[in-house]
Image (tube, helix red, strand yellow):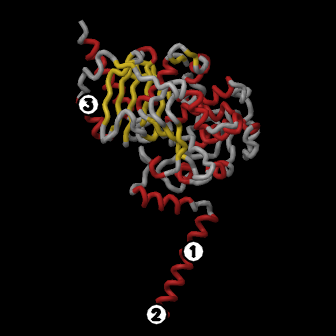
Amino acid sequence: MKKLLSIFKVITLVLMLFVGGLFVSGYGYLLKLGVKIIEIGRTTAGLEDYIHFEVREIPKSNTTQPWAIHTNYNSVTPTKALKKLHEAHKTVAFLIIKNDSIWHEQYFDGFGKDSKTNSFSMIKTIVAASLAKAIEEGHVKSFDQKAKDFLPWLKGKYANEMTVGNLATMSSGLDWKEDYDNLLTITPRTYITSDITRVMKTIPIKNEPGKRFVYQSGSTQLLSLLLTQATGETISNLVRRYFWNPLGAHANANWRLDSTKNGVEKSYCCFNSNARDYARFAALFKNGGAWKGTQLISPEYVQKSVTPQFENGQDYGYGWWLGSHLGKRFFSMRGHNGQYVIVFPEDDIIVVRLGHEQLPDLPGVRHSADYLGYMEEAFAMLAYDNASKP
């Protein structure tokens, strides 16, 4: 018995030293992550993670506005290739909006038009637009105002030089490596932390800002913290006031928080809404910042936001991913695991795809093959519809 007690004491001491070492080294979050993995039953982020974390509720619009339904709604059968994409990558929602009317709509796996799903990085586009609105309201002087005016705790060699615009264009110089698979990197740490502001205060502005595009979730998180300081409002309240309410969002949304008491939004991800309401924001930018005759955001910013800002970032503007395919120009909101809202302005088309999985990025580009596949099959369906007209 004494021998067993001695072994138990040694094991206990080793565990205590191990746990203490994790916290001292900055990896204490791994314990929280382990607990969540056991609770959720998976090691990756998911569409309905909001169920397992604290959230801030975002009420639907005071004046909900239904989408118009196209006269040819769901009249064209999805292509075989599209069906394979849905099955292979576990699509939960797929919409095609033509001339501001829902032309095609499908849901899978028990999801429907009111089902909330994690936007992941699609929300970065909306946070960037919230900066433009804060400038319009005078809370921020311009895109060139120094970020340190609002976040005096910023540190690093170039902390005094970084502007608010640098955060929106992913050119902040932040010492941040975007990695979703390595649990020892900063992205998983911020996903699980209960004090995201404290974590962000530890990350320096290491490189000269405004020189090159480097995609970083941390830049959006800093931008959100900055907007809260500038306006005195949570980012949840700003997004509802600026966009969700005037756009007539038909269902309640929510935003995941870092803790239960006076929580801060995980603003680079974790906004949860539905396919129809995500599409409203895309339609706003497709239509030059106007919604049903009301100018919600300046057309100058809309144009600026879909224009490349850096030579090494020709596929990115202010929160929007940019490109062309099938001879058609597009801009899109994109999120982890294949959350896509894609706008083809000249064709007056919006394609929405939400789901559980996506393919890896293609060689030499920052997008996956399924991303292009959803576009191709949407236009194949639309071509059949056009050909069937007398």
Q: Earlier in the sequence, mark 3 or mark 2?
A: 2
Assign a secondary structure to mark 1. helix
Q: Quadrant of residue 348?
A: top left
Does residue 92 appear left or right of residue 318 in this picture? left
- Residue 221 in the image: x percent, y percent? 61, 41
Residue 162 in view in this figure: no
Instruction: Depth check: give the residue in front, 275 or 128.
Output: 275
Q: Quadrant of residue 232?
A: top right
Rounded to the nearest angstrom, the CA distance separating label 1 from label 3 is 54 Å
User: In the rendered image of this protein, does residue 46 appear above or below residue 143?
Assistant: below
Q: Earlier in the sequence, mark 1 or mark 2?
A: 2
Given this view, does label 1 or label 3 mark the residue nearer the observer?
Answer: 1
Assign a secondary structure to mark 2. loop
- Residue 131 in the image: x percent, y percent? 64, 30
Q: Earlier in the sequence, mark 1 or mark 3?
A: 1
Q: Quadrant of the C terminus?
A: top left
Given this view, does label 3 or label 2 mark the residue nearer the observer?
Answer: 2
Q: Which residue is mark 2?
A: 1
Callouts 1 and 3 close, C-beta under 8 Å: no
User: In the rendered image of this protein, does residue 377 appear above or below residue 43?
Assistant: above
Q: Residue furthest bottom?
A: 2
The amino acid type found where label 3 is placed reads Ala
Q: Residue at x 61, y 64 (%)?
A: 23
Assign a secondary structure to mark 3. helix
Q: Which residue is mark 1?
A: 16
Q: Which residue is mark 3?
A: 81
